[in-house]
Image (cartoon, grey):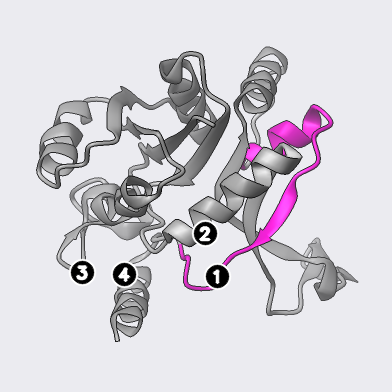
Amino acid sequence: MKTIAIITAAGKGKRMGAKINKPYITFAGKPILAHTILPFEQSKVITSVIIVAAEGLEDFCLRNIVEKFRFKKVDTIVCGGRERQDSVMAGILAAGTGWDVVVVHDGVRPLVTTAMIEETVLTARRTGAATLAIPVKDTIKQVSSGFVKKTLQREQLWAIQTPQTFRFDILKRAHRLAKKQGFIGTDDCILVERVGQKVAIVKGSYDNIKITTPEDLILGEAILKNRQR
């Protein structure tokens, strides 16, 4: 089955406080995005990769990431949109037709592994949709007007990660419907949920962090060093 990966790397990362866009910040000796692409390049189930870059940085991404690190599976670099959802749709449109499965991943989750990617792909082939997720560790409370309204059952709560993987036709249909209705979701799973598709949970890893703040860079490098040991 033909599987395409869409890696979103259009975010500016204001909370990072850096002078360059977050995907290009140096992490363990090379740009975050280069770390992120590598397991997709190495995975046997990934046929092709599309990078969604910030407007005006397409050539920069090509020269400083794809060509510099000799990624062979990256076929296309496209311009992202205002919302992450717009960026994923840009990737879907750039992919064209002929794909069975699509994997969507955050460009600033550089600690994803080939095993994580492949498990979501195998699950999505079987069920139609799958996402990495981890059980929450903390007690979660619903709050209203500054006061606790309800304590949620922790055993039923999972923190959602990426990759999120779908049969291509399902995700494309879900994005088209969301656009038509003007709906903006927080991830791709909620879009396919809205068209009646159940999303299977694949247990992820607490190591699969998203680099959002300077502290995440420190934690991420510590995780990487521990893996290398």
Q: Position of residue 84 (x, y in %)?
A: 49, 35
Neighbour class for label 2 at 10 Å: few (<14), some, many (≥20)?
some
* Disc nearer the start of the sequence (2/1): 2
Residue contact at pointers 2 and 1, CB within 8 angstroms: yes
- Measure the alpha-carbon separation of dots 3 and 4: 9 Å
Relative to 130, residue 59 above or below = above
- The amino acid type, in three-letter code, at marker 2 is Met
Q: Give above or below for 201 relative to 153.
A: above
Mark nearer the viewer, 4 or 1: 1
Whole-angstrom CA distance, mark 4 to mark 1, is 17 Å
Q: Label 4, on which residue?
A: 217
Mark 2–mark 1 distance (CA, rounded to whole Å)? 8 Å
Q: Magenta region: which residues?
A: 187-209
Q: Which mark is residue 116?
A: 2
The residue beneath circle 1 is 205
- The mark that comes first in sequence, 3 or 4, is 3
Three-letter amino acid code of the residue under disc 4: Leu
Callout 3 secondary element:
loop
Q: Quadrant of the C terminus?
A: bottom left
Residue 28 — which label?
3
Q: Position of residue 166 (x, y in %)?
A: 63, 36
Helix or strand or loop: what does disc 2 sit on?
A: helix
In the image, taking residue 92 as reference, residue 42 lies left or right, namely left
Q: Which residue occupies the foreground of this view, 176 or 166?
A: 166
Mark 3: amino acid: Ala
> Can you say which quadrant of the picture contains the N terminus?
top right
- For marks 2 and 1, give the one nearer the viewer: 2
Marked residue nearer the N-terminal end (4 or 1): 1
